[in-house]
Image (cartoon, helix red, strand yellow):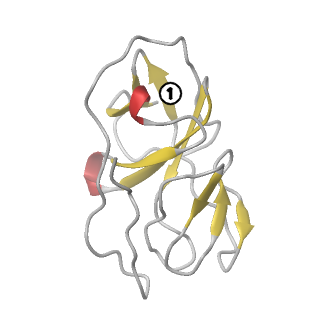
Amino acid sequence: MPSGLVACSSGSSTGTSPTRGGGTTPNTGSTGSTGSTGSTGAAGGALVALADVPEGGGAVVDAPGGKKIVIARVSATEVKAFDATCPHQGSMVAEPSGGTITCPSHGSQFAAADGKVKKGPATTGLRAVNVRVDGDQIVLA
């Protein structure tokens, strides 16, 4: 699968990132949600198929209103989501890998489980977005 990595500089987000979607798989009984505030669109809007978000990894997907959301599958039964905009200078972060979300512009790292800063230069974490698993899809909560 293509990577969602897009390199940006000077805080401007340029280009586009491949998104994941489509496809269906049986429901694995997975449930999960972020326990935090904020949503970038209407509740219930499908973002990506659960099967397209690997456990321990994630995806950068399109959200309503032209925003990007980074989704992390922190375990087989739990997904988290955050605004994909790095709080350091506004670049788009990459897909999660190994429990870490990295900004390719300046190297900030965030914990996929809660969006908190693991390594700067960012000084604040990623803004959480409420999502939940609905059948075989991850949707806005």
Q: Residue at x 68, y 44 (%)?
A: 113
Indicate the amino acid at tag 1: Arg
Figure disc tally:
1
Q: Quadrant of residue 66?
A: bottom left
Q: Which residue is at the far bottom?
A: 10
Is 17 above or below relative to 1?
below
Is 26 above or below relative to 88?
above
Q: Residue at x 42, y 51 (%)?
A: 69
Query: Is disc 1 placed on a helix, strand or loop?
Result: strand
Q: Quadrant of residue 87?
A: bottom right
Observer-nearest of 91 and 3:
3
Q: Residue at x 38, y 57 (%)?
A: 4
Percent x, y for residue 70?
A: 47, 50
Q: Quadrant of residue 110?
A: bottom right
Percent x, y for residue 68?
A: 37, 55
Side of 63 relative to 99 (left or right): left
Label 1 crowd (10 A; few <14 / some 14-19 / many >=20): many
Is 70 above or below relative to 7?
above
Q: Residue at x 50, y 36 (%)?
A: 54
Q: What residue is disc 1 on?
A: 132
Percent x, y for residue 2?
A: 33, 53
Side of 120 relative to 37 (left or right): right
